[in-house]
Structure formats: structure tokens, C-alpha cells
Image (tube, coloured by chain):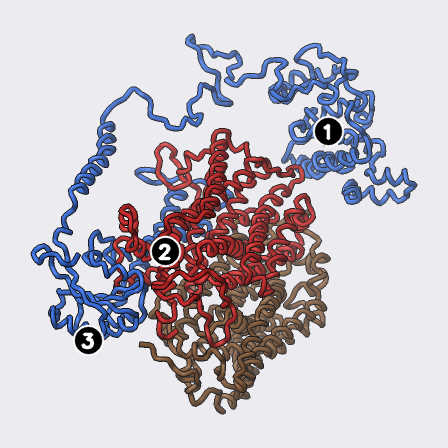
Chain colours: A blue, B red, C brown
Amino acid sequence: MADKHDNDSKLVGLLAQFDDPDSLVSACNEARLAGYKSMDAYSPFPVHGIDPAIGIQRSLLPFLVFVVGFGACFVGLGMQYYTNAAEWSPIFPGYAFKISGKPIFSLPANIPVTFEVIVLSSAFATFLGMWGLNKLPMFSNPLHRISRFKRATNDKFFLMIETKDEKFNRSETESQLNQWGAVAIEECRQDLTDNQLPSWVRLVGLLGVFLLMLPPVMIFRNMGMTNRQPRLHVVPDMDWQHKEKTQVLSPVMENGEYLFADERAMRQPVDGAIPRGRLEIDSEMYRGLKKDYRPKSAASSIKTNAQFVSASLEDKKEAPAAEAEDVSMWLTKFPEGITVDQDFVERGQQRFNIYCSACHGYDANGNGLVNQKAMALGANGQAQWTAAKSLHDATVKDDSKNPLGRIFDTITNGRNTMGPYGSQIPVEDRWAIVAYVKALQQTGIKPLTAVVDEDAGGEDDKKSDADGGSDAEDKTS
Amino acid sequence: MASVNPAIDIDNTNEEPGTRAPLVLGGLDYAGVTETVCAPWEAENPPKIWWLILAAAVSLLLVLGGCVNHLLMKGVGVWGNNNPAYWGWPIVNFVFWVGIGHAGTLISAILFLFRQNWRTSINRAAEAMTIFAVVCAGLFPGVHIGRVWVFYWLFPIPTEHLAMWPNFRSPLLWDVFAVSTYATVSILFWYMGMVPDIATFRDRCKTKIGKLVYGVLSLGWTGSARNWHRYEIAYTILAALATPLVLSVHTIVSFDFAVSQLPGWHTTIFPPYFVAGAIFSGFAAVVTLLVPARAIYGLQNLITLRHLENMNKIIMATGMMVGTAYGIEFFIAWYSGVPNEQFAFINRAFGNFWWAYWIMVTCNVVIPQLFWFKWCRTTPWFMVIVCIFVNIGMWFERFVITITSLCRDFLPSSWAYFHPTGVDIMMLIGSFGLFTTLFLLFCRFLPVIAMAEVKGIMPHGDGHH
Amino acid sequence: MHETRPAKITSDVVTLNDGHLKAMPLLLIVGAIGLGLSLLLTGFNFERFSFIYLVNFCFLLSISLGCLFFVIISHLTRAGWNVTVRRLAELFAMCTLPLGLLFLLILVPVLFGSSSVYSWNAPGWSAHSVEQAAVIADLPAEVRPPIEQEKGGYLNSGFFSVRAIAYFLIWGAMGWFFLKTSLAQDESGDVGLTKRMQALSAPILILFAVTIVFSSFDFEMSLSPLWFSTMFPVYFFAGAFMSGLITITLTAMWLQKSGRVTDEITTEHYHDLGKLTFGFIVFWGYIAFSQFMLIWYANIPEETFWYRYRMEGGWGVLSLLLVAGHLFIPFLAIMGRTARRSQKFLAGAGIFLLVMHWVDHYWLIMPEMNQYTNSFTFNPLIDIPCAVGMIAIYIAIFCYVARNRPLVPLKDPRLGEALNHAVH
């Protein structure tokens, strides 16, 4: 490749080959001592000791990286301050909001991202800075035209003394290189046509530039236009739906009246509507009602969960209705499919302790922690609280007034100020709680173990009275 | 010209104090190293086993693609995630994969700073593994956000339409920054390290397309001493940046858990303990990949038993650190006197997920003890088995941390059990397909061993060694 | 290009000279005066004195433990570059056993039931400290756990003493093993001894990890018996190794200045020690930040009070000083290669860092004296004489341990590697 005519190519330098790194280093040293400055060594791996041999100054790269990293520290912090703590801005205002109990600008929480920004910027500075200082990528290099030089990335070592060096002299330099132990010497010539791009590259380049111009031109064109079409929405993502949001007013008709008389956009389920998968046809199991019981009207006192909210709005009007309740409709025994045994009652105890004891207390005397606290606050006038019911009250205990089904219903739908637990406790567990409540009521204010102990002829039940259910739980768990 | 030496294991694991055992065996010279590393790439056809594994890997990749598609069409309900286990398998998988990635950076950056020369034969493959593992890791939280098409909301990009910014006080956002920075810096580091070797490929390439592609990728590298000078400085700086970065990544992953108040998650030792665990699993993955790779490609002279033994020692050491952290956690849970904390740890060992806990302890603490025996850490097939167990154990560690704590938090009323679905399981298996496919393509088209670095540490390359 | 030095010690003087050894009684007198003066200036307030004594004790102990770790990890990784400075680390590691004697001043009162330093030693401490912590942490009365019975199994004077004695015996045995074997090699040059130390370094490291974990819990964390952090041992270790490295560096410089070990330790060694120190400055910062961040972010009362206390008043200023002086200033100072290769600069940075490491222990320990009353205790008249005295005693111990023993391993098989050590 190097044998082009002189008028097509220009001598760049003399390339000398060496077979091992040590002779390369010593040749470099000789060359430096001989006064050469424009030279470079080429090796398949960094050869130690070559930097002083050629006279390479230590690179400024670390300093550059430090400056970038230092700046990135402030960029990172500034970005977080701007976006999370500052609300001023001509464009894209910040979004200051309090979250997770942290101050608006909370330095410790901002350190991780700042750190990452520093590392990312420094890494790019290192990477790009290194290539930039090395003047790479380079699209053409006369060295690559020398077939011998292909071994420079494999196992051979080269030293090139460039023609631009003041001391360069074609023949003298060659003899010096030979003297320093070069295995082979070759001219490195730059093909002057190398500087001209092939025609197809130009074509492709022009085409590329043209295509790149298209989007900005189109955007610019559209910015000055009006369009009746809605904005392009790539992923529909349920953004546009024909619906009313929750808790808003009813749509207004053309005549100025609300579409729905109650002025609410939200609709109540149609009477008798049943949510999908919630048919629950076994009314004994799911509602605690006797099988043959048929409600006289849909507006009976039995509420579904969906109706509970709306019904509670009208509690005041309906209050007397609760008095007129027909107790005979409630189931008086456990429904089929429920077997009451030791495990079942223990399950009930565990669930009771989780869900009910907070208000009713472990021993169901109506004095759970929440109740105590709320009563204390109530005494100061700081809260309004209706005392939790003791489940040992005569009315609650009385099977004729409060049959099993009614207790079940109380758990499911709530009663008076007690909220519904139907959504939180599975049906079987609710029945288990019912069983446990009945067991508690039978023992008086005594936990389950006391009853068991009594049955087994145990005597010391006074002690466990004080500890309530927690003691019993220890034994069962 | 040296020929590729027959692939046999030469035992170079015994080192007399005062001498250093050779890291390049088989009497390879510079050209021999080039030949050995380039042989798999220059071979006209890859070996049959490569095709077989690729076929299996691509099938798994298709499974993964199918699952992701199903997920996007149906929504995250196809996973077993429930209330309270909002973080189910996807997050377990994420932490698992991100952890595996750490070994690559450890080998390429930390061992470099500690001047551990033996890293040169394994760093390239380990770095590649890092990137592929991070790809797998990024997939899971990526799809976990539900609406992947608006993933850019995670980044502080000004949008008029959103009129708000990410919350920089959230550890999940730190994660976004940490993992994306990690992926970017790993790729820069990997690519920069590869340029001299790509130049070797360029100079040996015989096809036109190959010349163009490797020519462009090698950026006109000549191996000039002036270039090497800046290159080495840049390499050191990148290593010095990657070292705290790799620590920060798993630290921030651990912050996701540890800044919360959940018993079992809120433990201050999490950052270093997660990092140790990550290196532990990552090294196990490197061994699992390199033992077959060196056998298939005949790289035994470069990836020697000594390399493998050193890695196994690190596996043992980090395994011990992880084991110590388990112990400290238990002790402090008791010492703290906080009932919730105590319960969380007793529940791990003896609660619903006891089996996961004991798999974890067996695989992470007990099985690596085999490496005390020299035979175990110098027998390739055996160490692969141990390393696979280590990775199983580390997957279960993340499972134990994520799931058991979520399923048993403060309120017994919100306790539940976690069941993975088929999609969960198929996605985990599928991610191995993605990982293996990428790794096989890497083995075929890029230099598997950092030739320039290996040559740099060879004795006749450097007179005073 | 590369000239290889023979693997032989060429310095004429590789042991301490008579002057150093004669200074030992003087150092002990300085120590006694320093401690006495400190006690006098507290007005014979033994509680105040014990606390500052503990600060200095932990500071010196951490240096020795850092050096012990240096020795262990050198053998574990078969390091060659640091052979010429390893003997110094061995000597400092051996100082752990005499340091154990100094701990008796704390331990004996504990055995006699004193709770002035370790408040858990007084019956009923939990009620007292929970009460006080509650003021800080707004703990409601109902949730205060019955901590005393629970922790009593671990935090009691008997078990504490057994553990403390065990730590010092174990560390002493480790230090003695390495020093003795290494000295034996000076005589025989037996390569087998190196192999033996390498083989045993792995189990020794495990034992070291266990002891450092529990000793840091016992000596420093249990001062605030209510508080707990799993990260604490790592924090202690990070500072310990950093200060150990600095102590090795400074001692080597001092020896060379006094013409002891002239050309065995070169700029390359200082550069590497500087790099390791730099790494552990960052590691300390990483651990300190992680521990703080997790506790600050989760904001759980039973942990936060510890930091909240240290973030207010004088302690807050000290915390900021620590962040700046233990992390940012030294980080920027020895980041540059030129800085690390300048002996004078490195020595200055090293002394500064040791002071900061002392402040670190002060910050860990002293706030627990006036638990939860938030009174800043720094009083240079009490603290500085005590520090000077203790350091003088420590140097005396070092001189005693070093005696006329060689300060570099004479026949280590990797000596050649260390002598020809050059950073590429």
C-alpha cells in the first residue's frame, strides 16, 4: 500500500518494528536522547517505562474530571432543590410538597441522587475527555494502510519518527533506527486521496442531514397552525372516557335541570343488584337469615355493604325503624357447613382478639384500649364517643333478642356507631367470632382457658381474669 | 506462531511464598494469547453446543417476551403480588439480578485498584455479565410500574402536561438514578476496555462487514503510547468512580428496604450486607459462566485453575460476611428489646416461610464452607455445583427479606400469605433466557478476554515481574 | 529499565535505639502526670474522668485493632508490597494485650457495681433511661418495653467482664502469634512459617470479626443501653482500620527521620498506604452516612434519640466538625496523587485524621455521660491532658514491645517484592 507514487502521497514518517517491549523502550530512549520529539510508539498493550522514554507529560485528564465532578455536585443538588423545594420559575415551576414527614428540602435524602449525578458526569467526562484528548475517533490514519502495522494490536512493537520533527532526515533517521535495533523499517505514507470522502458517503450524509431536518421543520410548521383535530394521544391509557368522576355533581341537561334528581353523578346500585361473584345465595351462611325469610321490601333493615354508606346518611330518619325489627328472621343456630369445635372457637378467639378487642376488650366487657382512650378524651370534651358495648350485657346475651344470626349481621354490617367488618373478615371467620362471643358470654367475664380449666376441673381461674384474653392466647398459640 | 494449546487443566494453584504463580499457562506468548482469544471468533461456525444453548436460551427469551406481553395486556394482577405483599417476585428478581451484576464491577474496578493481576483474564466476561444482569434487573421494576409507556415520568424531565416532578426524597427514585447510572458507567467502562481488543479484531477481520463494524467500533485505535497513557489514566479514574458507584447501587437497593419501618427491613447493617451478598452471588455467577465457557472455547490456559480458586475464595469470604450479618441481625433483634423486631426474625426462621429461610441458610452459609477444602475449590465441575447453590440461596435471601417481612408487619389483621403465579415463575425463568442469549452473543462476536490486559501482565512483557 | 534490588535489608539500623528505649520511663511519667492532671482538674469527679479515659482507651484500642487487621489481611491476600511495613503493624497489634491492663481501670469498678460509665450496671436503669429517652423520643408510656430483664442476660457486670477479658486474650494471642512467627522467620528464614501464617489467617479473621463485633457493642454501643444499630461494628472497624493505616505511616516516617529504616520504605509504600487511607476515609463516610441516613429517614423513636441528641447544641457542632474533618476535608486533601506522594503533606494529613478519629470516639462516647440532658462536655483542660497522657503510655508500650526487635521482617520470602515495589 505504501508504494504509491510520490505525487499522490506524502511521507509522514518512518516506522520501525521491534519484537519485544524492552527493545522498544530502549529505542525510544535513544531517540529521545538523539533529540527527536515528534515520535510515537505503538504497542499491543501499555508498555511500562515508555512514558518517560518518549517524554510524555502527565495528562490533564484527572483535573478535568475533578472540575466536572465538582460542578456536578452543585448541579445535582440544584436540580433537586429546584424540582422539590422551589416553586418559583418562569417555566416549568418546581413542585414543592411535603411527603413522608421530611422537610421540603432535606439534605440527607438528597445525597444519594447527588452522588449518582457526580459519578455519572465524572464518568462521561473521563470517557469523552480521554477520547477527545487522544483525538479519537479518527476516520483515517495512514498507519492502517501498512499491513505490517496490523501486528501492532497483536504482538509487535513499533516506533514512528515523524517527518515533521526538526531532526528528521530520511536516510540518517533510518540508519539510526537500524542502529537502535529495529527489526524492520518501513515508510509511512499518507495517501492524499484519503482526505476525500467516497462519493456515496457524501450522498448518504446529505440524505441523512435532510431527513434529520424534517422533524424540526414539521414541528416548526405545525407550531404556527391551528388544527381542529384533538392532540395525538399515542397510548389511550383510559385517559378519555365517557364517565363522571366520583363525588361530582350530576350532569346538567339542556333545560338546565340536573339529569339525576338527587344532583349526584354517582348512582346507587339498582335494588337487588348483586356484585359479580357475590351471589351468596345461601342466606343462612352469608347473612345470618333464616332460609325461609323473605324481606318485605328492599328498604328493609338488612343492608348490603353498598347500601351502608347511603343508608347511614339517612340514619337519623330511619332510627326508629331499628326498633321495629323482626327478630324472628335471624338464624338461631350455626348455618350448615360450619362445625363448631375447639379449633373453630380458638380461631374465633384469635380473630376476635385481632379485630374486636381493640374496642370491646379481650374479655368483651367493652373496655378495650381504644375505648379507654376515647372515653378519656371524651371526658375532656376532646372527642365524641359512644362507649363500646359490653358483650356481657343482658340484651346482648339474650338469645331471644340477639340470636346468632343477628350477631353475625352486626359484625358484617355494623350496628349503631359500630362500623361494618364484612369487607375485612371472611365469612367463616365471622361465624368463628360469633362462636367465640357466645363462649365468652357463657363464661361471664372469663377467658376461654378458664372455661377449659373449669371443665377439666381446674381451679385457679381468678388469676387469668385479670390478664384477659392475652393469657388464653398464649396457651392456644 | 503459537498454535492453540490443547485444553487441559494445569494446576497452578500452589504458590511458594516469594514467587508468584504464572497466570498465563501453556507457554503462550503474545501471539499465542491473541490466537487463543480470537479462535472462537474466527471459527467459521460456533461449536454445536453453542447452538444448543442458544436455542434453549432463545426459547426461554420467547417465554419471557410472551409473559411481558401478557402482563402489559392484562395488568400486574397476573402476578401473585397482593396486599400486603406489594413487592412480590418482580422485586425479588430485581434485587437478585442487580446483585449478580456487582461481581463484574468488583473484578474490573476494585480488584484493579488493589492491583490483583489475576483479574485480567476474567474481567471482560464479568463486565459483560454485569451489563446483561443489569438489563435483566431493569426489566422487572420497569414492568412493575404498571404503565411502562410513561416510564419517563421517573426522570426529571420537564413536562407541561404533568406539571410536577419526581420526589427526590423517595428511595425508589434513588434507585432509578443508581441503576441507570450504574448501567451507563458499566457500559462506558466495558466499551472503553474493549476498544484495544476490538482493534485487534479489526486488524484480523477478513470480511468486509466485519472490517466496517469493528473499524467503526475501534474508533481508529492504533495503540500509540500517547493514547495508552491517557487511556490508562482514564481507566484508573473510571475504576475509582466505579468502586463507590457499585457500593452505592446495592446500598441504595438496600435503602429501598431499610429506610422503611418494617420489622426485618429496618436494619442499619443492610448497606454493607447487601453489597457483600451481591458480590457473593455475582462471583458465583461468574464461576458458573466461565467454567463451561473455558471448556467450550479452550481457554484453560488463560482462565486457569488459579483464577477459579481465587474467585472461590472470595465467594467463601463474602459468604462468611453474609452469614455474620445474619447473626448480627438476630442478635440485635433480641438485644433491641423491640417485640416487633424480635418477632420478625423468629418468624423468618420458624414462621410460614421457614423453608425459604433454611434454604437460604443452607445454600449461603453451609454449602460454601466446602470451599475450605482445596479439592472443592479447584475442581471445576464441583465448584459450579456449589456456585449454583449459592445463587439459589441468594435468590431465596431476597425472597425471605422481601416477602416474609411484608406478609407479617405490625398489624396481624393485615397478615397474609404470598403465592407466586405461573407468570411470576415463567418470568424468572425467562429472564435467564435473556441473560444467556446476550452472553452467548457476546461470546460469539466480542473479545471474551481482555487480550491487551493479559499481555500487560505477562512476565516477559514487564521485565521486573 | 527495571533495576532489581536484592532481597536484603541494607539499612544499618533496623531497631529502636537506646534513646528511644530510655525514653520509656519518661513517657510513663508523662502519662501519669497527664492522667493525674486530668483527674485533678475534674475535681476528682471519677465519672467525668472515666469517660474521657474510655474515649482515649477506645481510640488507642482501635488503632491497635486496625493494625491487627492489617497483619491478618496481608497474610490472607498473600500481599507482597507491604512486607517492609508489616512488622510495625505486628508490633502495634501486640499492644492490645497491655491495653487490656489499661482497661482494668474501667472494668474493676464495673465489677464492683459502679454504674458511672456503663449505666446498665445499676438496677433499675431501664426505668431511668427509658424515662429520659422518652423525653427525647416522645415515647408514650404504654409502649415502653420491659427492657431491663430482657437485656440483663447480656448486659451484666459478670458476663461483661468475661467477654472483655476474652477479647483481650484473643487479640493478644493473635498479635503474639503473628509477631512470634514473624520474628522466628527473621532467624530462620523458613518459608513454611509464612505458609503457616497464611493458612491460619482465614480462621483468625473470622474470630477477629466476631470479637470486633461484640467488643464494639460492649465498649461503646452499650453506653447507651437502650440504643442499637447493627451497623455499629462496621462503623467502629472502618475508623479503626483507617487510623491503623495512618499510625503505620506516621511511625514509618518517624523511624526514617530518626535514621532507623532508611531505604526499605519508599515513596511507593507511602503512596499505597495513602491510597488505602483514602479508601477507608471514603468507607468510613459511607458507613457513617448509611447508618445516619437509615435512622434519620425511618425516624423510629427507639433509635432516633441517639442521633437527635448528637444533633443539638454543642454536639451538633461536633457532628458537623466530624463530617467535615473526618470526611470532606481529608477526602479533598489526599485525593491527588501529588499530595499522597509528598511525605510532609501525608504526615500532616495523617495527624489531622488521627485527631479527627479521636474526635469520632469522643462523639460516640461522651454524650452518654450526661445522658439526655444535652450538656456539651468538651473541656480542653480535662480532655487534652488525659489524651496526652494516654498516648504517651501507648508509645511507651510500643517501645517496650518493639525493644530491640527488628522493625522490618529480615527474611520474609516476599521481601524482594516489597523492596522492588513500584506503582505502575
Quadrant in which the N terminus of chain B is drawn: bottom left
**Residue lying at 51% horizontally and 67% vertically, measured from the top left:** B11
Residue neighbourhood size for the residue with mark 3, other residues' Cα within 10 Å, grouped as few (<14), some (14–19), many (≥20): few
From where the camera sits, is residue C412 visible? Answer: yes
Residue B38's tag is 2
Q: Are marks 2 and 1 in contact (CB under 8 Å)?
A: no
**Quick one: SS at disc 2?**
helix
Q: As displayed, is residue A245 above or below residue B434?
A: above
Mark 2 vs mark 1: tell me if same chain: no
Residue neighbourhood size for the residue with mark 1, other residues' Cα within 10 Å, grouped as few (<14), some (14–19), many (≥20): some
Q: Nearer the viewer, mark 2 or mark 1?
A: 2
Q: Are marks 3 and 2 in contact (CB under 8 Å)?
A: no
Name of the residue lying farthest toward the right: A457
Quadrant in which the C terminus of chain B is drawn: bottom left
How far across and down, in percent of the image, does residue A237 sit? 43, 27
Q: Looking at the rendering, which quadrant does residue A208 occupy? A: top left
Residue A428's tag is 1
Residue A179's tag is 3
**Quick one: SS at disc 1?**
helix
Residue toward you, A33 or B38: B38
Task: Say whether residue C216 is left or right of residue A30.
Answer: right
Task: Say whether residue A228 is left or right of residue C19.
Answer: left
How far across and down, in percent of the image, does residue B106 sit? 45, 58
Mark 1 belongs to chain: A
Gap in angstroms between the C-alphas marked 2 and 1? 69 Å
Q: Looking at the rendering, which quadrant does residue A430 occupy? A: top right
Residue toward you, A373 or B436: B436
**Quick one: SS at disc 3?**
helix
How far across and down, in percent of the image, does residue C302 sit? 61, 52
Task: Say whether residue A339 is left or right of residue A218.
Answer: right
User: Earlier along the polypeptide chain: callout 3 or callout 1?
Assistant: 3
